[in-house]
Amino acid sequence: MIRRVVTAAVLIISICMPSISLGAKFSYGVWVPYWKKAVAIPEVVQNVNSLKEISPFSYEVQKSGIVRDAMRLTDVSWLTLMETAYGSNIKIIPTFSWQNGDEIHAILSSSTLRTAHIANILRVVDANDFDGIDIDYENKKAETSTYFSKFLTELSKAIHAKKKTLSCTIEARTPPSSRFVTVPKVLEYANDFKVINTVCDEVRIMAYEQGRVDLKLNKTKSASGNYYAPISDSDWVEKVILEALKTIKKEKIMLGVANFGSEYDVRLVNGVSTYTDLRNLSYNEFQVLASTTASKVVRNNAGESGFIYTVNSISSTSTIIGTSTLTNATSTRFVTLSDSKAIQAKITLAKKYKLKGVFLFKIDGESDPNLWSVLK
């Protein structure tokens, strides 16, 4: 068992590093991606006393429902992180990730395959003696909702029998009146919030990757020319929180907050701006891009750091957000970053609504230098 790897070294760590109070009402957690572990783990270890939960990201579920250890948790770097966490009374709750909606439906809609999948998850938990698990199954179909609810209900019963935690990571839900010009009479969702509230001990809401989903905010905030495709506008996040609180207990909600940036390609097609998400950026990558394109970074209407620049076959030129007009240039790039100031705004919202806490995606070893000072 991985937990049994904790030896005398952990006793030293626990003495040298003050543990977090178990009575704290507001807590912080982080996802740590396996593809950035070499630089991410040292950042987490250095700031471990700001945290209550750590979720290595991730175990990946394959088409058959078998769980693959993409993290290679026996690697010494992961063991160092877990030793540090256990020595500081911090929970290790790894994330099980599945992104293929068709595969998810095929497994969960079969009672036989669903049972086998749950058994596979439990074997991983037992083999490593984790404090719990985090289920992050995305891109599900609405028709999968009933089966996903059955899966969580059955998994919850099994996990709770082992006295462990079931965390459920779900997509943010935008209020229908903000999402549609005309709200459909029948709305179908892949996640049943009522069931999730009942069977999950913790609900992590991914309140990021907003893009252009909120039609009302797009209209009201774009008038200044300073609002394009936010990662997570605080006004939108507040809507997401209020929508969730209609069904999910505030004591269970961990607000998922972005610790990254995005770059979009923006083009005018028949007079309409189209947005293509090109890539995510770390804080460092954002700064380098701003520097190499000679861009001036400003605080945009979403409360994030941002800039735009144009790209053509000859050269790249920079334009400050709010003073430019998008044209049919070869390519106009919009770049936005959820930096420490933007993250602080989300923390303030989570505390305002007395949520359980905030969970950051992701710690990558290249965070805003001021990030950890706002995790108070």
Image: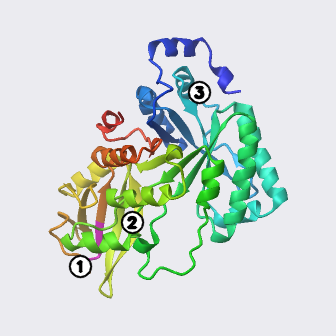
Closer to the chain start, of discs 2 and 3, is 3
Q: Measuring 53% from the left and 28% from the top, which residue is drawn there?
A: 90
User: Which-is-in-front pick, marks 1 and 2?
Assistant: 2
- Please, what is the three-letter code of the amino acid marked with disc 3? Leu
Magenta part of the protein: which range?
329-333
How far is the residue under mark 1 from the one under mark 2? 20 Å
Q: Measuring 73% from the left and 57% from the top, which residue is drawn there?
A: 150
How far is the residue under mark 2 from the one under mark 3? 37 Å
Closer to the chain start, of discs 1 and 2, is 2
- Please, what is the three-letter code of the amino acid marked with disc 2? Gly
- Residue 171 appears in the rendering: yes
Q: Residues within 10 Å of mark 2 (few under 14, many from 20)?
A: some
In the picture of the structure, the residue carrying the numbered disc 2 is: 211
For the C terminus, give its image quadrant. Answer: top left
Residue 257 point in image, percent of width and height: 42, 49
Label 1 sits on a secondary structure element that is: loop
For the N terminus, give its image quadrant. Answer: top right
Residue 8 point in image, percent of width and height: 59, 11
Q: Are marks 2 and 3 in contact (CB under 8 Å)?
A: no
Q: Measuring 59% from the left and 72% from the top, which residue is drawn there?
A: 188
Label 3 sits on a secondary structure element that is: helix
Of residues 315 and 310, which is closer to you in this image? 310
Is residue 183 shown in magenta? no
Relative placement, left or right, of 202 versus 48 is right
Q: Residues within 10 Å of mark 1 (few under 14, many from 20)?
A: some
In the picture of the structure, the residue carrying the numbered disc 1 is: 327
Residue 305 point in image, percent of width and height: 26, 54
Q: Quadrant of residue 42?
A: top left
In the picture of the structure, the residue carrying the numbered disc 3 is: 79
Q: Residues within 10 Å of mark 3 (few under 14, many from 20)?
A: some
